[in-house]
Amino acid sequence: MSAMIEVRDVSKSFGGVIANDKVSLDVPEGRVTGLIGPNGSGKTTLFNSIVGYHPIDEGSIKFEGTEISDMLVPQIARLGLLRTFQQTRIYSKMDCVKNMLISIPHRHETFKTMFQEYPPEATDEAERLLEFVGLYSKRKLISGDLSFGQQKLLEFAMALMNKPRLLLLDEPTAGINPTLINGLIDRLRMAATEMGVTLFVIEHNMPVIMNLADNVYCLANGKLLAHGTPDEIQNDERVINAYLGGHLEMEDA
Ligand code: ADP
Ligand code: MG
């Protein structure tokens, strides 16, 4: 079976900086694929390339067999391929339900853009997804008043509002209170198993990746360093030297 996303020999430079250097990887459907690597190793750049945020210099990116590397963000989003950001992007002065309603730009053809004119089904769906991420009781609160972790849950729910087939999550647990992390992991896993959303996740928190991902890629200096099961990656000498060793020291500091 071919992968949902096939990245082949993708390179991307910014001026003299080679952010991705002939990266090839597969994201299989219905699974959770992890992406790790030191800061600056090119993880976010690869996500940006996949969702059409910027053109690649060379290589090929296929989504279900279709070349998407020459498509723009809205076109790719319409195929069901979405991302969330390292920093949350919510509308902090609006309540959670309104955030959910305005987060569906590529479905605006069917809805009026003014949120008060959204059909009741959209509000129902928004409330159902807020319940799914554990924010139902906060649905009428101004989203800027939520904790950072709750804002991340809201952002995740906003992405689900678009009915993605594949969701790219850039450090979903960064800055989240440890007590909320387990809840978020459960929700991510349920999105994969119950809603059929394939996940591709950049994550610095190694226990989270080990818990969540079926297979893991490691980047270093823009190049693919290793690929394997979480267990294989955790015990891979190259990964330990390039990333885990330094990363563990950092956490101890
Ligand atoms: P990671 O997400 O793994 O921390 P990034 O993909 O953000 O790494 O960055 C990879 C490299 O590309 C870094 O050296 C970074 O400074 C550089 N880079 C990323 N985006 C840009 C940009 N828009 N302009 C210039 N340099 C960039
Ligand atoms: Mg990054």
Image (cartoon, rainbow, N blue to C red):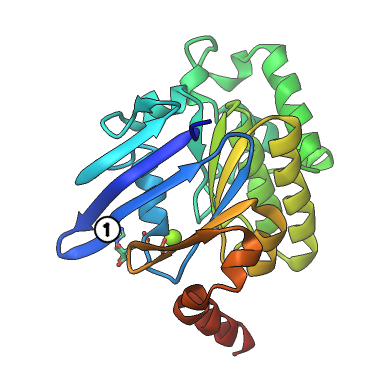
Q: Is residue 163 visible?
A: yes
Give the percent coordinates (x, y) of residue 119.
66, 11
Give the percent coordinates (x, y) of residue 9.
28, 48
Q: Name the residue located 38 percent from the left edge and 66 percent from the top edge.
A: 41
Q: Name the residue located 63 percent from the left edge and 61 percent from the top edge.
A: 230
**Residue occupied by mark 1:** 21
Q: Name the residue located 35 percent from the left edge and 53 percent from the top edge.
A: 45
**Circle 1: is it few (<14), some (14-19), or many (20+) Cα within 10 Å?**
many
Q: Is residue 150 above or below residue 2?
A: below
Q: Name the residue located 56 percent from the left edge and 58 percent from the top edge.
A: 228
Q: Is residue 188 above or below residue 116?
A: below
Give the percent coordinates (x, y) of residue 186.
78, 49
Indicate the quadrant containing the C terminus: top left, top right, bottom left or bottom right: bottom right
Quadrant of picture, ligand 1: bottom left
Q: Is residue 145 visible?
A: no
Give the percent coordinates (x, y) of residue 188.
70, 45
Q: Is residue 243 above or below residue 214?
A: below
The one nearer the camera, 109 or 33, is 33
The single residue placed furthest to the front in the displayed view is: 1
Q: For the residue labelled by badge 1, is the local secondary structure a helix, a strand or a loop? A: strand
The single residue placed furthest to the right in the displayed view is: 137
The single residue placed furthest to the left in the displayed view is: 16
